[in-house]
Image (spheres, rainbow, N blue to C red):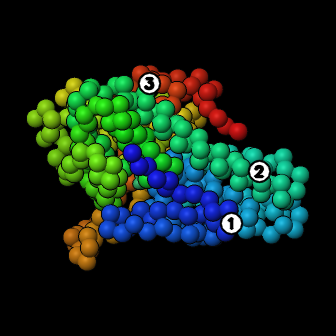
Amino acid sequence: MSATATLWWDAENESIHYIEQTLLPNEYSLVECRSIERLATAIRRLEIRGAPALGVAGAYGVALSAFLSEKKDLKSFTAAVHRDADILRSTRPTAINLAWGIDRVLASMASAHDCNDARSCAIAKAHEIAREDTACCHAIGKHGAALLPDTCTVLTHCNAGALACSSWGTALGVIRSAVNEGKKVKVISCETRPLMQGARLTAWELARDGIDVTTITDSTAAHLMRKGTIDAVVVGADRITSDAVFNKIGTYMHAVCAHHHKIPFYVAAPLSTFDANNYEKDVIIEERGREEVTIMGNRTYVPDEAHVKNYAFDATPMELVSAVITETGVLRPPIEIHKLLSHRNTT
Ligand code: MRU
């Protein structure tokens, strides 16, 4: 089953390559990125997106900065890399993986004895983070597949697939692993207004792998749950605090409906998505531009006089979550995040 890398380092050209996700499914296009400004724009525009992929992009971004920064002396070199890291960190506030990837690479450079050594440490750590992410997705897939019946229909929201990670995916990793094990899984992919990651990306990935996928409008989900069509909901996460799961706007709505219809609601995410230092009230939910809501194609659908609210994410209270599937196993809430993170790789 395919699950191509979403972004990778080109050692020869000292650059980052990635799949330009805003163009999918109409155009499969690879971009080569050689500047921090371009990478920051790519993250802001969602050319690269999805929490684990942002972690990997942040990590390779710091490595790219180390290759671009002038090697005058270690102090000014390090200061330049930290400035670039701050630019990248500020691009998207909700997915915790971005800052986590950046900080791990910065930490790896802290004991370097010269600029060349700092570069080597940075790129080695970025590669390690990318490799780890793929391994986490496969482990999540294995643990999650065990939760699914042999024949089932799974609803997912947004894209928590290979495109949102190094490869394989978290929520879609669970589905891929289940299908690999011989389970008969049908997927209902919510389109995910306004940027349509479910319709454009999830349906594209699964169809490419020959997995049965049906796209619905977001508002069709409750109807299908009521009809008894959905056996489980599996989504990804951008951040998990002890009291809430942050994921793409609309996730909370599915969790409420799933709870009402007694359908298990699973969250698939690596430990890098957990936040032991904050509660729901502390987390910034990204708000994006009105044009994402008001314009479709060449047409404007909302009068200029109307206000628009465009939250990119929402918070699902932990009591609506049946389980969180991580690389270390299946966790049933309440989850003691501090204890859990003693397993997490922070170096
Ligand atoms: O705004 P996006 O497309 O970056 O949002 C992505 C999501 O909400 C995903 O569900 C989440 O990052 C989990 S990805 C494994």
Instruction: Report the front residue among 253 and 100.
Output: 100
Judging by the rendered image, the residue that carries numbered circle 1 is: 12
Q: For the N terminus, which image quadrant?
A: top left
On the question of residue 246 being in view, the answer is no
Q: Position of residue 30 (x, y in %)?
A: 48, 67
Q: Nearer the viewer, mark 3 or mark 1?
A: 1
Judging by the rendered image, the residue that carries numbered circle 2 is: 121
Specify the label residue 35 is tagged with: none
Residue type, numbered disc 1:
Glu
Residue placed at 31% from the left, 46% from the top? 157
Q: Is residue 335 above or below residue 140?
A: above
Assess mark 2: CB under 8 A from ligand 1?
Answer: no
Task: Kindly report the distance in space between the C-alpha atoms of the residues bearing marks 3 and 2.
Answer: 33 Å
Residue placed at 77% from the left, 57% from the top? 119
On the question of residue 151 being in view, the answer is yes
Circle 1/circle 2 CB separation < 8 Å: no
